[in-house]
Structure formats: C-alpha cells, structure tokens
Image (tube, rainbow, N blue to C red):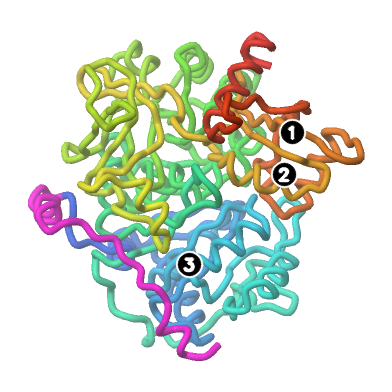
C-alpha cells in the first residue's frame, strides 16, 4: 500500500475533559501505567513464576515477555509501523496472550474479534479500524480461518499481512516471526489508545471502542482488589478471551498485573474446564448465566476436585435470584455477580456482601468516581428505587466510539454520560438490579445482537417481504432471538431461511433462534409505525400467545 494511506488514517483517541483528568489522577486512578511497562516489571519481578498455562504450554513471566518481544519485533520487520491497527482473531491459546502483548511491545493496536465472527463482521472491523494486518489461527473448532483470511484480503486489500498461529500455508507463521528487538519503540503515552474493542452493537454492526492504557489498567487493577486477585490466585479463562469480561473483570490482564497464573480453557463447558480447575488449582473464573447453571448441575456428579474454586463470577447477562441460588448450592463457592460493558462501567457484588444481596442484584460500581444516573425517557432522574435508563461516566468509561459520529451523537449526552441502553433499578448503597435492555438489542447468553443488523440480512432474502427481530425470554439463554417474517413468492420453511442466513458469513449466534411467519404487521391508523414500536408489539403479542416463555 502507498504511504499516503498511512498518513490519512483516522487518529485513535479517547479524550476526557481536563478537570476530570485532573480528578482521576489526583484520586490515584490513573497512574501513568502502560501495558509494556507493567509487563516488563512483572517479567523482572516474577521471572520464573508461571504466567500462562494453555494445553501443554506453560510460560513463565520472563518467557511471556520474551515471546512478546519476538512477535512485536517480527511484526515491525514485516514493515508494520507503530500506530497501525491489527485485527486479532484467536481462540483461548497461549498465542492469543503472547500476540496481544507482542502488539503492545511493538506499539501496534490490537482490534479484537471473537472466534465466532465471520467475513461480514471481519470486513466491517477491518474497514472501520483501517487495519493493516490480520492475525488468526489455522483452524478453530473445525473452521478454516485461512480461507477467511483469503476472503478478507480480497475484500479489504489494505490488510497487507496475514499471520497464522499454526500451519500458515501461503501466509506468515506466528512462530516464524523474527526481528530486531532494538527496533521496538519506547513505552507509549499512558493516555494513548492501547487497543480497540468491539461493542455489543445495539444498532447495526458493532462499534469500535478505543481504550487507553490509563483507563483500562485502572479498571482491572481496581477489579483485582474487589475480586480478591493476588499473586496466589489462579484465574481460569473459560469464555472467549477476547471478550471484555474474561479480559479485564479482573480477567487475564488483572491476573497478570497481580503476578498470578492464567489458565486458558479451550472451551467453557465442564468437560474442558473441570479437569483444569483440579489440575491447576483454579481459584477464580467468570461465566455467563447458562454456563454457570450447567457447571452447577455438572458439579454434582463430577469426579474432579473443584474445592480450590473460591469465586465464581457470573455476568454478561442477568442472573435471576433463583438461578443464583442454584449456582451457589451447586458449586459451594462465593458467587460474585458482575454487570458491565466493554464501553466502561463495571459493577460487582462484593465478596463479603450478604448472600441475600448477592442473589438479588448485579453489584455496584468499581470506582467512587463512577457517576451513575437513572433517568426516564426525557433524561430526568427517576425517584430512588424506580426503574429507568442507566447513564454513566467515569475514569474508565469511554467518551466516544472510533470513527462513528452518528453513534456518538446517539450514545453520549452533552455532558459526557454514556447511554448504556440498560434499564436498571438502583438500590440503597448504589447497587443495581438490571431490568433488561431499553433498545432493540438482544442479550443472548451474553452475546449482544442488534435486531436491526439481523433484519437487514433477512430483508436481503428474495422470499422475505419484511422482517422484525425481537428478544424472547429464555430460561437457559436469558434471551433468544425470534424473527417475525412476512414471506413473499415461493413458499419456504424456517430451516431453509436459517441455513441461508448462516451462508451470509455471520457469526452463528446471530442466526435467529426462532422464525415465525406472519401475514402482516399491525400498523397505526395512518399506516406508519416505528420499528421499535413494531418490535414491542410483536414481542408482547407473542408472549401473550405462548404464555411468556416459548
């Protein structure tokens, strides 16, 4: 690519007002720490301690730092320049952590994609972030990611380099990267953007979330204190590591910051995780509600010793009180409810909270400087204990998405509060009870799905005249997606439509769980109705007809 494209790349930034920056520094939230600096310090202090366990791989802190240097220098040797963005799509492997740390050492900016994402999402991320490279695996769960890489480069030629963890075929092998370590840059500005995360996406495709070194390190450093993570902890990454929850709440970054051990599970189910808990003496793990219930059920008949597990965190979707009690009874450890978002605000129940509080709510904010507003549809505060829309700002909550003026205008107030899209009730003491989503957004076992995005895909089918996608309560998933479809032309059935959706290069979790064919949608007297109102009507009618859960 010509160098002109490099100069025209949109800058990455996250800017807080000067008075708030001063407040956050004064309070000790922002300490001027960076990812390369803290990783270097831990490598020196805990050189021989095991940092990362994945399969047969065991890396000490010194080895993690060395591997990160090799990968970082190797990427620069390919011609990448500090500041360029790199799309990372790796499973729960040692390579995921060494790669991300290598990108930090090289001054390159990771853009996290989930293993489930396919070509539609990757093209969007690569274009939006202006990515120059893509790092992925050869195979994940039987899916050929090298084929995905070829498709991505065909669609987005600006992705000049592809690096593969495993059999690289015509691409560059991760293990073959080499370069001159003296070319690695100095530590970055703590206020610079360390990486881009992806949002759940309440409308359309996911947005990109710029997180700075200062704000993100604060979030997991403070999380460590609230989650009991110290040098003796063993943290299990069971969910996909690229999710914000297993990354920073306190996640593997929190564990590495504490000098603890990170254990990566190839999958989240009991079959994969329980042997690791027993073997590595895992003390803490984070799960979404359906998995927590599955673990609690499986523990009753498991032959593995799970007694080392001290804290099970549950987040990503609401854990209702009855389910919370089942998890506590089934696993016999402390339950910690977690409610947060990749954009920032994270709430925890405290480890010493009474059980009746732990089961009843989703925690309270990390920071004394997390500002929370609960407001009505007109942004006016609701009375204490009333349900309203959650707005927030604070030392680790973003002030804007990358390269998305429309989303920023919609998602942030004039005084910098982020509109989370959640409806909550605030209890005395600042504890929050999540009541659901305010917008057209489906929370399926912790995966956030945009109704609008799925409708757009459905409308591309020649046999679909119109479509509306809604959330339906689900005992196992929390919510599932239901597509109401007005067909046209040749008749077809739901399985055929689902199969066609899968063929569009979407993550599998976005394919509607249920398809209901209807003759028409109700409209108002003047023949107009908003999509939001339509979805609300369809959802209410379906729940009434099915008794609420089917």
Query: Contact (CB < 8 A) between labels 2 and 1?
Result: yes
Query: Contact (CB < 8 A) between labels 3 and 1?
Result: no
* Placement of the N terminus among the 4 image quadrants: bottom right
Depicted 517 relative to depicted 157: above or below: above
Residue 120 location in percent, x, y?
A: 65, 58
Q: Which mark is residue 485?
A: 1
Q: What kind of element bears circle 1?
A: strand
The residues tagged by marks 2 and 3 sit, at their Cα atoms, a distance apart of 26 Å
- Camera-side residue: 272 or 450? 450
User: Can you identify the residue that label 2 sits on?
Assistant: 458
Drawn side of residue 313 relative to residue 484, left or right: left
Q: Residue at x 22, y 45 (%)?
A: 394
* Placement of the C terminus among the 4 image quadrants: top right
The residues tagged by marks 3 and 1 sit, at their Cα atoms, a distance apart of 34 Å
Quadrant location of residue 380? Answer: top left
Alpha-carbon neighbours of circle 2 within 10 Å: few (<14), some, or many (≥20)?
many
Residue 290 seen in this snapshot: no
User: Can you identify the residue that label 3 sits on?
Assistant: 129
Write down the region rendered in magenta. 1-28
Depicted 533 relative to depicted 22: above or below: above
- Residue 322 belongs to magenta span: no
Quadrant location of residue 303? Answer: top right
Q: Residue at x 78, y 41 (%)?
A: 464
Badge nearest the viewer, 3 or 1: 1
């Amino acid at each position: 690519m010509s160098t002109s494209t490099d100069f025209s790349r949109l800058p990455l930034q996250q800017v807080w007002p000067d008075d708030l920056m001063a407040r956050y520094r004064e309070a000790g939230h922002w300490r001027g720490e960076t990812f390369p600096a803290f990783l270097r310090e831990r490598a020196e202090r805990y050189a021989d301690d095991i940092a990362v366990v994945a399969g047969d791989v065991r890396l000490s802190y010194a080895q993690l730092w060395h591997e990160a240097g090799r990968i970082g220098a190797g990427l620069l040797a390919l011609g990448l320049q500090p500041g360029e963005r790199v799309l990372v799509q790796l499973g729960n492997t040692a390579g995921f952590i060494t790669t991300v740390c290598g990108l930090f050492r090289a001054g390159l900016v990771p853009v996290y994609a989930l293993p489930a994402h396919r070509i539609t999402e990757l093209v969007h991320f690569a274009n939006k972030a202006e990515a120059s490279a893509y790092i992925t695996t050869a195979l994940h769960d039987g899916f050929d990611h090298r084929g995905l890489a070829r498709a991505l480069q065909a669609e987005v030629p600006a992705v000049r380099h592809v690096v593969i963890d495993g059999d690289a075929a015509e691409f560059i092998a991760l293990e073959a990267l080499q370069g001159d370590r003296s070319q690695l840059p100095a530590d970055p500005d703590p206020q610079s953007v360390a990486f881009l995360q992806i949002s759940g996406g309440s409308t359309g495709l996911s947005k990109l979330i710029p997180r700075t070194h200062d704000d993100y390190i604060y979030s997991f450093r403070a999380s460590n204190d609230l989650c009991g993570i110290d040098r003796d902890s063993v943290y299990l990454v069971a969910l996909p590591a690229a999710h914000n929850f297993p990354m920073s709440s306190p996640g593997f970054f929190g564990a590495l910051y504490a000098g603890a051990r990170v254990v990566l599970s190839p999958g989240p189910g009991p079959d994969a995780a329980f042997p690791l808990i027993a073997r590595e003496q895992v003390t803490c793990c984070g799960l979404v509600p359906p998995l927590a219930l599955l673990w609690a059920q499986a523990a009753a008949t498991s032959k593995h010793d799970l007694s080392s597990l001290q804290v099970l965190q549950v987040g990503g979707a609401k854990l209702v009180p009855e389910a919370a009690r089942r998890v506590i009874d089934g696993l016999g450890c402390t339950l910690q409810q977690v409610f947060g978002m990749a954009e920032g605000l994270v709430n925890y129940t405290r480890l010493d909270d009474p059980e009746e509080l732990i089961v009843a709510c989703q925690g309270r904010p990390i920071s004394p400087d997390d500002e929370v507003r609960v407001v009505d549809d007109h942004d006016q505060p609701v009375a204490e204990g009333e349900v309203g829309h959650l707005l927030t700002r604070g030392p680790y909550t973003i002030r804007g998405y990358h390269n998305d003026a429309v989303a920023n205008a919609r998602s942030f107030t004039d005084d910098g509060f982020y509109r989370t899209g959640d409806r909550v009730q605030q209890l005395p003491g600042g504890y929050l009870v999540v009541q659901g989503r305010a917008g057209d957004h489906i929370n399926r076992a912790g995966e956030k799905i945009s109704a609008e995005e799925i409708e757009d895909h459905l409308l591309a089918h020649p046999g679909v005249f119109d479509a509306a996608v809604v959330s339906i309560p689900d005992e196992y998933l929390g919510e599932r997606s239901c597509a109401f479809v007005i067909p046209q032309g040749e008749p077809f059935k739901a399985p055929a439509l689902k199969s066609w959706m899968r063929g569009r290069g979407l993550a599998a979790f976005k394919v509607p769980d249920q398809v209901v064919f209807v003759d028409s949608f109700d409209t108002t007297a003047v023949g107009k109705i908003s999509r939001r109102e339509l979805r609300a009507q369809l959802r209410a009618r379906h729940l009434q007809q099915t008794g609420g859960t089917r």
